[in-house]
Amino acid sequence: MKKILTAVLTLAMLAGAAGLATAQAKKVTVWCWDPNFNGYSMKQAAEVYNKAHPEVTIEIVDIPQQIESKIEAGLQAGGAGLPDIALFQDFQIERFIANYPGIFADLKAAGVDYSQFAAYKVGIMSEKGKVYGIPFDTGSTGLYLRSDYLKQAGVNPDNYLKELTWKDILALGKTVKAKINKSLIAYDSTDYQFLRMIVQSTGGQFFDAAGKLNLNTPAVKAGLQVLKDLNDAGVLYQTEGWNNWVSAFNNGDAAGMVSAVWLIGTLKSQPANAGKWMVAPTPRLEGVAGAQNASNWGGSSWYVFDKAKNKAAAIDFLKSVWASKDPASLGFYNTILKGAGAMGTYLPSRTGATYTASDEFFYKNQKVYADFAKWMEKVPAVRYTANFNAMGTALTASISKYLKGDLKTPDAVVADATTAYNQQVQ
């Protein structure tokens, strides 16, 4: 009997050890693409999670280029080689949801409370009552202005730290140009994002409910007219490409630009400009219903593959850190904002010290993160669809013709871009 009892205890111990080994061997693999931004943020999240779950390894894999192409290759191979969690740019996700039904886990069914996230992030990851992603960073936008240039032009910067219209900006730009010969806004002519931000600020869309291109809208045409008016008045400082655009405002060739919260790190790379920059809300487009002093540029979110090897652990990890009011999770959001300039879209996190702090780099120690977080709540949602990239390519080319004078009216731009788009997607 004693031998039998010993054998039973031995088997139990072995089974327990085997179970422990299994738990310790559990690994959640994450794909993302920027070690200094989203990779850093996920590493911080893993550290928070591992304090309560040391048995789970969070492996973060840097995919520096063409992450979507690698994911599509894996999907076409039946899921071979795919991670448990992947980061997707927001404008890409509708294409994957449409083209690969059922590939993502429904995180709403898993208990994530989406009322706690910025609403504009949730819409694009939703389908027929299901919600697939965990929203990550915001691209909440604002109008960045050099306060020292405004002063040189005889303008009080304090008068522009408020909600403005594009008509106000046109008038301000004319004054600055006339007084100190500086264009107010740096503009990248190789990208249509400026117009896209204007259109999104109205809740306007580039596609109809059926996913068909529709540029013939009041928001698109009014936005095009704003661009033309700014350009013709010398308010736009035209550049080509990202690097030239950044150089234009960092070097002081332009007195400002419209961009997202994530640009702050780029501005701070020039410490000589400390105390000079200020940020106002995104200008509002007059005459278009639903227009707000808020818009968005960029942003990404985390998704769990439905057939992931460690799906349950992956979901628990994202819920426990990225969608939790636990003090450690809220502290995590402040950590990534301070360490990488990554502003999350989990609304309860905005009470942290980093969000509410004054920033000495900005004019009069502006609380820039608090401002961007406040504007984020007002950002209207926009549909991207599977053909968003094709639309952007067509529209960029047509806008360039418009600003050069080859196309004379917003209607002509709409017709030209629509023709080019149809040639791409047919």
Image (cartoon, rainbow, N blue to C red):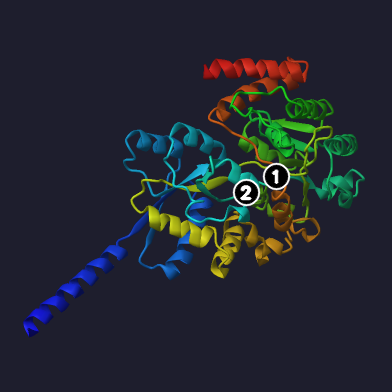
Question: Is 173 on the left or on the right of 204, as rendered?
Answer: right
Residue at the outermost right position:
154
Q: Nearer the viewer, mark 2 or mark 1?
A: 1
Q: Nearer the viewer, residue 108 or 28?
A: 108
Cα separation between marks 2 and 1: 10 Å
Q: Secondary structure at mark 2?
A: loop
- Look at the image and tell me whether residue 385 can be seen: yes
Q: Is residue 313 left or right of residue 88?
A: left
Pick whichever of labels 2 and 1 is earlier in the sequence: 2
> Which residue is label 1 attached to?
379
Q: In this picture, is 335 found above or below 294?
A: below
The one of 178 and 45 positioned closer to us in this rendering? 45
**Frontmost residue, 172 versus 413:** 413
**What residue is at 40 percent from the left and 67 percent from the top?**
53
Give the amino acid at mark 2: Thr
- Helix, strand or loop under label 1: loop
Q: Give the image location of residue 412, x and y in percent.
A: 73, 15
**Residue 213: x %, y % from top left:** 62, 23
Look at label 1 and name its amino acid. Answer: Val
- Residue 335 x %, y %: 58, 63
Could you classify mark 1 by the number of other residues whose Cα lies within 10 Å: few (under 14), some (14-19), or many (20 or more)?
many
Mark 2 vs 1: CB contact within 8 A: yes
Residue that mark 2 sits on: 138
Observer-nearest residue: 365 or 316? 316
Q: Quarter holding the N terminus?
A: bottom left
